[in-house]
Amino acid sequence: MLSAIEAGPDVADPFTVEPPAVPLANRVAAELVGTAALVAVVVGSGIQATGLSEDVGLQLLANSLATVFGLGVLILLLGPVSGAHFNPVVTLAEWWTGRKDPKGLGAREVAAYIPAQIAGAIAGAILADAMFGKTLVEWSTHDRSAGHLLLGEVVATAGLVLLIFGLAKTDHLRFAPVAVASYIGAAYWFTSSTSFANPAVTIGRAFTDTFAGIAPGSVPGFVGMQLIGGILGLALVALVFGHRRRTTAAAAPN
């Protein structure tokens, strides 16, 4: 989540593009571990919340707070290693925006990052179930196929992409741990879908029949809407921040 994303050559930020000195294997490991930890936080806090209260509102509050804190820490810790994407939509969006930049994220990195994110998400869900004595793999029965939930995923994902790439455009990526975690926490409450906004996390959450789960049959719809949301988010970035590229080009020496 903390990659350069065309932030500009004058940005001196420790959380910009993945350092070339970091081997791809380490970056992939960071994506796998980070996504696994994120899903473990989401699923585990959901299990804990349902065991402590029967009030659905309190359950969601506990789940969202744990996710906010966990995500912020993970971005801060792993951002300097891999960019802390933990999300195929973010990875694909960065590849697309930097496809003409020799230093941008390449197809090789994308092909390594996305499987690692998905594998990590599945492992995180299984780990959470194991920690709470649940069946290690039990397909979720929580149907989330309603149209208004799908719309919520478009909104949640578009907002996430707009935030991350907007921070890069305005040279504010150093605030990403707080900003991204805060956005996800808010989106838990203002979106009908409780803001999955992440295909890998969506797949992982299908492996647990708990509070945070999603029925396998609902996964394709969610993933499809998340991809659409990612495209919409990039369009909004161009619409809102396109002037910064023009200003930079005009200011460049001849």
Image (cartoon, rainbow, N blue to C red):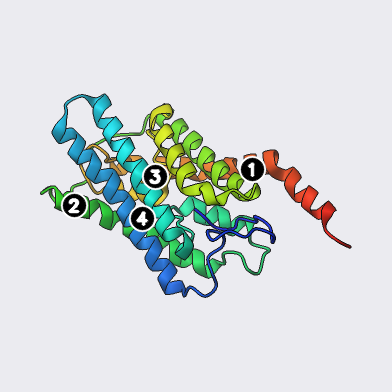
On residue 35, the disc is 4
Image vertical order of residue 218 relative to residue 99, above or below: above
Marks 2/1: CA–CA distance: 39 Å
Marks 3/2: CA–CA distance: 19 Å
Q: Amino acid at mark 1?
A: Val
Residue 66 at least partly seen: yes
Q: Toward which corner of the image does residue 12 lie, by quadrant?
A: bottom right
Q: Toward which corner of the image does residue 186 lie, by quadrant?
A: top left
Q: Amino acid at mark 3?
A: Pro
Of 93 and 166, nearer the camera is 166
Mark 4 surroundings: few (<14), some (14-19) or many (≥20) residues within 10 A: many
Residue at point 58%, 44% (across, down): 231
Residue marked by disc 2: 137
Mark 2 and 1 residues: CB-CB less than 8 Å, in contact?
no
Residue marked by disc 3: 220
Mark 3 surroundings: few (<14), some (14-19) or many (≥20) residues within 10 A: some
Label whose residue precedes the other's in the sequence (2 or 1): 2
Residue at point 25%, 51% (across, down): 125
Residue at point 26%, 35% (across, down): 142
Residue marked by disc 1: 237
Marks 1/4: CA–CA distance: 25 Å
Q: Residue 18 in the image: state x and y as whole percent.
A: 53, 65
Label whose residue precedes the other's in the sequence (3 or 2): 2
Mark 4 and 2 residues: CB-CB less than 8 Å, in contact?
no
